[in-house]
Amino acid sequence: GDSVTQMEGPVTLSEEAFLTINCTYTATGYPSLFWYVQYPGEGLQLLLKATKADDKGSNKGFEATYRKETTSFHLEKGSVQVSDSAVYFCALRGSSGGSYIPTFGRGTSLIVHP
Amino acid sequence: DTGVSQNPRHKITKRGQNVTFRCDPISEHNRLYWYRQTLGQGPEFLTYFQNEAQLEKSRLLSDRFSAERPKGSFSTLEIQRTEQGDSAMYLCASSLASQYNQPQHFGDGTRLSIL
């Protein structure tokens, strides 16, 4: 079945550092890929998405490129802020089977220090 | 558009009691999903509806759990005879059914604590 693997956290960075959170996936067909962010006490918010190979999703300075050859969708940001501290979830939604139930990774906690 | 709304935000109850949560999706969204999330984990799928029809249920959903969406708008999730292991955050999400690449919009969840 479909699966998503994220790097374990927490990832601890200083403000203005470069961020990479790795995500790899296993799926049949051509899934859509998503990054969600969850702040403490809240639900998940869509951060960005990509729906086909080589697409780059971007939002609020975050970027991720859909790499079919390496089955990856790594999240990057050039300069993190304290306000980026949250848990980040990589997810996929399959294109076959019809149920379209998303599969989520376990989440990666990001802590940014001033 | 006020987003996905869940009530209550927190629920504390004694083991063995029944609890019911409500989810109001984004009004034009015809798909509604329930997830459970425990600390340090991603959301685990429980069930989903398209309009009023419950189309899929996870094996995680024991017979103590029941969900309804009677008019294809709001949904309720009931847990009967609660157990310690039911303590978790219960998340609701909604989306459009038009294509598989549509993202889900999540509510802020209901945190359930079983004493």
Image (cartoon, coloured by chain):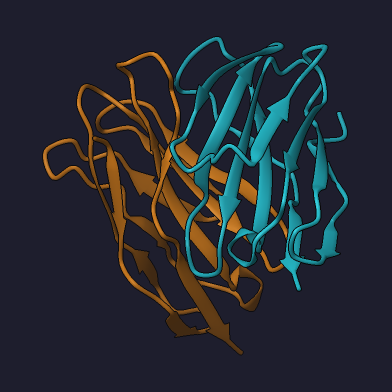
- Residue sitting nearer the eye, B6 or A35: B6
Side of A57 relative to B37 (left or right):
left
Side of B77 relative to B20 (left or right):
left
x and y, in percent, of residue A13 in the image: 46, 84
- Residue sitting nearer the eye, A39 or B6: B6
Q: Which chain is orange?
A: A
Above or below B84: residue A24:
above
- Which colour represents chain B? cyan
Which of the image's four quarters has the N terminus of chain A? top left
- Residue sitting nearer the eye, A85 or B74: B74
| Residue at x 45% of width, y 29% of height | A101
x and y, in percent, of residue A93 in the image: 40, 30
| Residue at x 31% of width, y 26% of height | A52
- Residue sitting nearer the eye, A102 or A69: A102
Q: Confirm whether residue B51 shows in the render.
A: yes
x and y, in percent, of residue B82 in the image: 70, 56
